[in-house]
Image: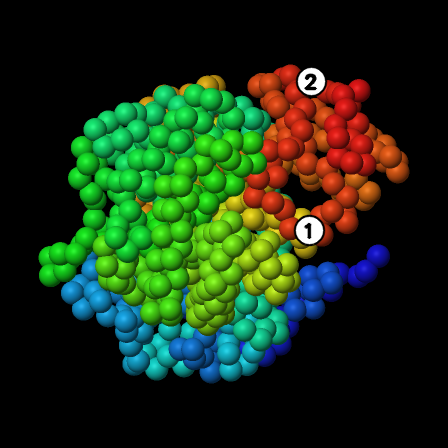
């Protein structure tokens, strides 16, 4: 057994921090309201104090097999008397700091959010100079950020509920080093504070953790409000231990920091514990019932409604996306409805350039987007057009996979080709796809952002389907462009949502992973896998890595939901949500299958299980208008919408969260097994283990612990077969195993992947 060595001095910690010109200190701060009025700091262990009788000690120990890491415990004890309105802190100070350093706090700060900012509200209007301007800078809403201006000090005040992982990170291009500090969520005095302070010269910066969080202002949705934070009135004998883990490591670039992060994001708090309570087949059944009941025929056409009204919005929040799982049901009624929706989309929404308008009312009035009075030409989101190309192509592939290729109409294929051509023309003319386009002219109305994150995927599929290699070439060129400009150089992707500015967001991160895996499928070039692994690491920064503690009287708190896997929206929209907007995330499964790295399987497993926690199915009751099987987009760990919003749902439903639930139920296998290896992974809400593995097949023991019958998709293959990229419609052929509630049974899987019940 290895001996645990305890470092009892600050010097041990500072020796680790020395490579990044860092040092550690402990602090006691007095407040009047939320304003600090006095602070004492300690830079070495001491038993003698003259400040409010606080005894402070630092305790550190190495992390086994990780020489780059230290576990740190800062102990604070009030030995006598009282200490009123006081907060306690651990700070890491960095001299030789640079504005060039990449700073990341998962889900809320990317590249320090050091960008031009506009507005003081949710979804601020764009200024005139942002239109038809190829040089428009990346522009964000009013979010916590480090100053873009030289000579200006910065203060980013957060609490752990603001972050997908309680962590603060940076990469230094000058030293080629990375730094990560991980902590836990809270103490008995509430969530910890996380503060980044940069001096006016921008050559010094500190990362601080505090008990409790003490912010003057709390970040909202593109604005700020009084935090309501209160320092603690301590009494003699009160003691608190503020714990964290630090990593100081070699890093050539931002991707190295992101890759390190995905490996350590759960290392300090520990693994989460997802609950098996809602089989994927049951969720699919309930959500498709809702979607089927929301099919309408209105003056403009027939379609599954993507909103809580009868208007239509293409892409983004489920328009012509929720129709895909309905087609996958493979019944005549829904198949004909899907055909009617495709007829409507291609006849009513496509502009002369080939691009589509983003929406239309039930009465046929087009819905332009992000308009400015000085520019009357109607605009549409590039993201929605990217979705349109991807999902139109996926529909065509699914019609063929189900044996109904004869139903595909020339008008659908022509519309897809026109849209792919529009993207190709834009790329050739501008060398990017922009954020908003004019569907009639094809001009980019607003440049910049990663709004075209999904476009390479659509172009790659279209290239294969229509035998147009030039589209695949553009898909590769554009994906390389966005990967280099946004991921490698800025450590973010953004501008993908219709209600934000160019803010960093999760939707573009996951959407771009879709594109990278599409390119791997169509080229078999493993460099796309390498890029995809970095992109998956960026996706992980947006995904809650632990099970947060919610207020005990909140809806989520009462249900004791395990919300690791909830996906944050954007640095503007500071909330998490059930699932990816809008996708199954099957590309994470495909990446796991291609690389063998279980982190990617764990990530999508967490996302699926957190989604199930947010589905209304009594007695697991969620306030979503009481519709069984419904869900909505709020999983709120932060006070961005006020303290009363933490852990509470909004009494409505969102089609897109129901849609990604349906898609996960289709495109993810319930059980994945490699029949020639001892490799088994369960995504569904069942238990499975290998009982016997022989050359001819494998025997599994399955158990359904939920209160619902399950129909579990089993994907079995050999390790050799796993070397081939997975087809988009592979799920059509996965065999299913029925398990009644509480049932345990054995199944036999042949070497060829056939399933036999025992």
* Placement of the C terminus among the 4 image quadrants: top right
Q: Secondary structure at mark 1?
A: loop
Above or below 9: residue 513 = above
| Residue placed under numbered mark 2 in the picture | 743
What whole-number distance in Å separates the C-alpha atoms at marks 1 and 2? 35 Å
Residue in view at x 21 percent, y 28 percent: 299
Q: Is residue 155 visible?
A: no
- x, y percent for residue 696: 87, 34
| Residue placed under numbered mark 1 in the picture | 724
Q: Residue furthest left?
A: 373
Above or below 569: residue 627 = above
> By what rule are the colours in the image chosen?
rainbow
Q: Is residue 723 visible?
A: yes
Q: Which mark is residue 325?
A: none
- x, y percent for residue 623: 36, 26
Assess disc 1: are there few (<14), some (14-19) or many (≥20) residues with their C-alpha within 10 Å of its C-alpha: few
Residue in view at x 56 percent, y 26 percent: 281
Residue in view at x 29 percent, y 77 percent: 149
Q: Is residue 424 found left or right of 179 in the rendered image?
A: left
Q: Quadrant of residue 408?
A: top left
Marks 1 and 2, the one that precedes in the sequence: 1
Q: Quadrant of residue 666?
A: top right
- x, y percent for residue 151: 29, 81
Residue in view at x 18 percent, y 32 percent: 363
Q: Quadrant of residue 718?
A: top right
């Amino acid at each position: 057994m290895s001996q645990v060595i305890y470092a009892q001095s600050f010097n041990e910690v500072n020796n680790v921090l020395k490579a990044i010109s860092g040092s550690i200190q402990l602090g006691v701060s007095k407040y009047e309201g939320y304003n600090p009025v006095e602070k004492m700091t300690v830079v070495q262990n001491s038993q003698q104090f003259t400040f409010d009788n606080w005894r402070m000690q630092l305790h550190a120990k190495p992390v086994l097999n990780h020489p780059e890491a230290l576990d740190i415990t800062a102990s604070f004890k009030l030995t006598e008397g009282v200490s009123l309105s006081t907060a306690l802190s651990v700070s890491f100070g960095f001299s030789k700091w640079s504005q060039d350093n990449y700073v990341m706090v998962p889900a809320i700060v990317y590249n320090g959010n050091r960008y031009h900012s506009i507005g003081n509200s949710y979804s601020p209007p764009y200024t005139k100079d942002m239109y038809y301007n190829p040089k428009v800078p990346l522009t964000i809403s009013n979010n916590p950020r480090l100053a873009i201006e030289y000579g200006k000090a910065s203060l980013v005040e957060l609490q752990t509920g603001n972050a997908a992982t309680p962590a603060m990170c940076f990469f230094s291009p000058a030293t080629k080093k990375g730094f990560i500090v991980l902590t836990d969520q809270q103490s008995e005095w509430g969530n910890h504070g996380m503060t980044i302070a940069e001096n006016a010269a921008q050559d010094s910066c500190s990362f601080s953790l505090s008990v409790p969080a003490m912010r003057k202002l709390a970040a909202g949705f593109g604005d700020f409000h009084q935090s309501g934070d209160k320092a603690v009135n301590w009494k003699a004998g009160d003691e608190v231990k503020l714990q964290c883990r630090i990593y100081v490591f070699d890093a050539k670039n931002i991707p190295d920091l992101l890759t390190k992060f995905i490996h350590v994001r759960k290392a300090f708090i520990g693994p989460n514990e997802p609950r098996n309570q809602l089989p994927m087949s049951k969720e699919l059944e309930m959500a498709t019932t809702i979607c089927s009941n929301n099919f309408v025929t209105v003056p403009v056409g027939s379609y599954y409604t993507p909103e809580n009204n009868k208007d239509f919005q293409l892409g983004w929040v489920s328009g012509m996306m929720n129709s895909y799982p309905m087609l996958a049901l493979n019944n005549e009624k829904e198949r004909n409805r899907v055909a009617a929706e495709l007829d409507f989309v291609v006849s009513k929404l496509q502009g002369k350039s080939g691009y589509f308008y983003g929406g239309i009312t039930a009465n046929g009035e087009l819905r332009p987007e992000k308009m400015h009075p000085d520019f009357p030409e109607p605009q549409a989101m590039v993201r929605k057009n990217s979705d349109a190309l991807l999902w139109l192509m996926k529909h065509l592939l699914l019609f063929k996979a189900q044996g109904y290729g004869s139903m595909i109409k020339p008008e659908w294929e022509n519309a897809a080709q026109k849209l792919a051509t529009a993207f190709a023309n834009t790329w050739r003319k501008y060398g990017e796809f922009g954020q908003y386009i004019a569907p009639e002219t094809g001009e980019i109305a607003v440049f910049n952002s990663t709004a075209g994150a999904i476009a390479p995927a659509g172009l790659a599929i279209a290239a294969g389907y229509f035998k147009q290699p030039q589209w695949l070439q553009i898909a590769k060129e554009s994906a390389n462009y966005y990967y280099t400009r946004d991921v490698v150089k800025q450590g973010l992707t953004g501008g993908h949502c219709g209600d934000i500015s160019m803010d960093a967001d999760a939707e573009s991160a996951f959407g771009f992973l879709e594109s990278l895996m599409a390119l791997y499928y169509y080229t078999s070039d493993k460099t796309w896998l390498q890029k995809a692994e970095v992109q998956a690491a960026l996706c992980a920064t947006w995904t809650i890595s632990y099970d947060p503690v919610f207020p005990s009287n909140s809806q989520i708190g009462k249900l004791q939901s395990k919300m690791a896997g909830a996906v944050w929206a954007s640095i503007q929209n500071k909330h998490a949500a059930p699932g990816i907007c809008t996708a199954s995330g099957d590309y994470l499964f495909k990446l796991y299958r291609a690389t063998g790295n279980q982190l990617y399987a764990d990530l999508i497993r967490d996302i699926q299980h957190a989604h199930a926690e947010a589905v209304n199915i009594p007695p697991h009751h969620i306030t979503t208008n009481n519709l069984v099987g419904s869900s909505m987009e709020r999983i709120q760990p932060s006070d961005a919408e006020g303290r009363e919003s933490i852990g509470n749902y909004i009494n409505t439903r969102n089609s897109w969260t129901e849609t990604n639930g349906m898609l996960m139920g289709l495109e993810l296998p319930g059980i994945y097994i490699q029949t020639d290896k001892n490799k088994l992974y369960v995504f569904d809400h069942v238990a499975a283990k290998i009982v016997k593995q022989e050359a001819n097949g494998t025997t599994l023991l399955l158990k359904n612990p939920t209160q619902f019958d399950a129909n579990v998709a089993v994907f079995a293959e050999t390790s050799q077969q796993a070397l081939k990229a997975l087809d988009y419609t592979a799920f059509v052929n996965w065999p299913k195993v029925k398990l009644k509630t509480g049932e345990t049974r054995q199944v036999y899987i042949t070497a060829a992947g056939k399933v036999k019940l025992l």
